[in-house]
Amino acid sequence: MYVFCKKCNNIVTSSEGVCKICGHPVRNGKSGLHKYTKFAIVGIVLILCGVFVVFYAQGRLDLSFIVNLFEPQITDVVDNGIYADTGNNVFIATDDDVDIAVVFDEEARLLLLSEVYTVASDFIEQFSAHFTLISNMGYLYNATENLFVTTDFLTGRNFLQLDVSENIIVLLLRPVDFADFEEVYLPYSNEMTLFVGHETITGIGLYSAYGYAEIFRENLNTLLLSYRPSESEIFRPLSSHRLYQDVVDLITNNNVQIDIRYMAANDDFVFTTVSNRGESHILRHYAFARGDDLTILAQQISNERELITTINQAAPNFNFNLLPEFSLNRDSLVQVDEDVLMAQLRTSTLTDNAIMPDYPPEFIATRHFYAYLVFTDDGSKFLASLANDWVIRQVANWQEAEEIIIENWGDINPPLYILRQE
């Protein structure tokens, strides 16, 4: 047995009886611990006793904080790989088939997620005014350039200065959509929120402004599937359709008549562009979710970027193929003097012996060398196009006018907003 000499602190065997350094007698069994060690033990015992008394007196003694930091703990078994916690937040994954060991360093992973999150967050803050950034199937998406914002995107644009070989995903999700998953607790918020994710032993680790949390893989898959766009068939309701009238009734205010300039729907959603009667140059957009009743997702919005982000936040599974082919971000209607325009049109050439009524049209809109007119009494419709002079043709309906414009203009932002869908 080894003991300490009380005089010089030399380590000697208790059988020797005398310290060879200073000659001080060592009593067997009496000096087995250094005096400071004894004091330390006494102090620890007193502290533990005090803790026990306090917690016992309060009726909530909890010793769950006592853990074994030295024995590896088996935390999970996945396929034929066994993951062990070595006690310092480093996980070892072993695979019997290929005889490999992979180290998952939790601290390093969190630092990496934090770095990617910061860069992606800065990108959103700096460029949300330049790009339309939305959630596409749950992933951060640059709708302006039709690109997913991945770590490769951020690295390629020199936003991210790391060589990220890890499989990190950049997500845009609403915290409220995590409510059904018990392993994740987030505030009840409908705001689209940035999440950066990485695969872990038990699932997917997500880093956000709310901190770090883990979600089971199958639950994240369920969440991402709920963000997939509604894929039911898209149709263009006519004025005889009940849905068309429901939309008109919902957005008509103070008995002001409106004109439906565009409307498209599927089983889940409706999108429409409208103007007030007599103000054909002022357009505004609406989006609705279909159900027992129509629920407004976005209303009276004219800015296209604001429109898309508003709809996306309200309904992440909205199918943006419901939006029209024209883009008001890249074009806009202008107010014209209808009397002057009509005076020009009435002296212009009408094809196929068409006859234009001699009273004012109920609806008229013009842009980019096209004008569309609807007359009330006989319901006649005319499409005028301007080359050197106006040439006017009578059309059977707005669908025919739409086909003519696309055929002559092309499919890149044709000015279909001059039409009235009915």
Image (cartoon, rainbow, N blue to C red):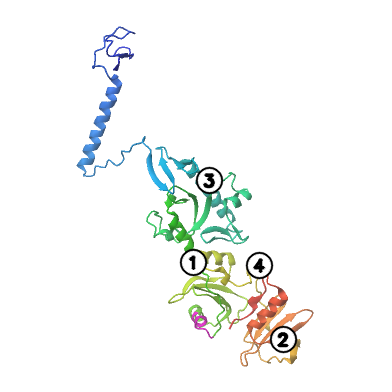
Which x, y percent locates residue 118? 53, 48
Which x, y percent locates residue 257? 54, 83
Label 1 sits on a secondary structure element that is loop
Mark 4: give few (<14), some (14-19) or many (20+) Cα within 10 Å.
few
The residue pinned by badge 3 equals 115
The answer to whether residue 19 is above or below residue 319 is: above
The region drawn magenta spans: 240-246
> In terms of sequence position, does the residue under pointer 2 or pointer 3 come before the other?
3
Residue at image point 70% right, 73% down: 410
Label 3 sits on a secondary structure element that is helix
How many tags in the picture? 4
Residue at image point 41% right, 41% down: 84
> In terms of sequence position, does the residue under pointer 2 or pointer 4 come before the other?
4
The residue pinned by badge 1 equals 315
* Residue found at the very far top of the displayed protein: 23
The C terminus - image quarter? bottom right
Front-lying residue, 25 or 104:
104
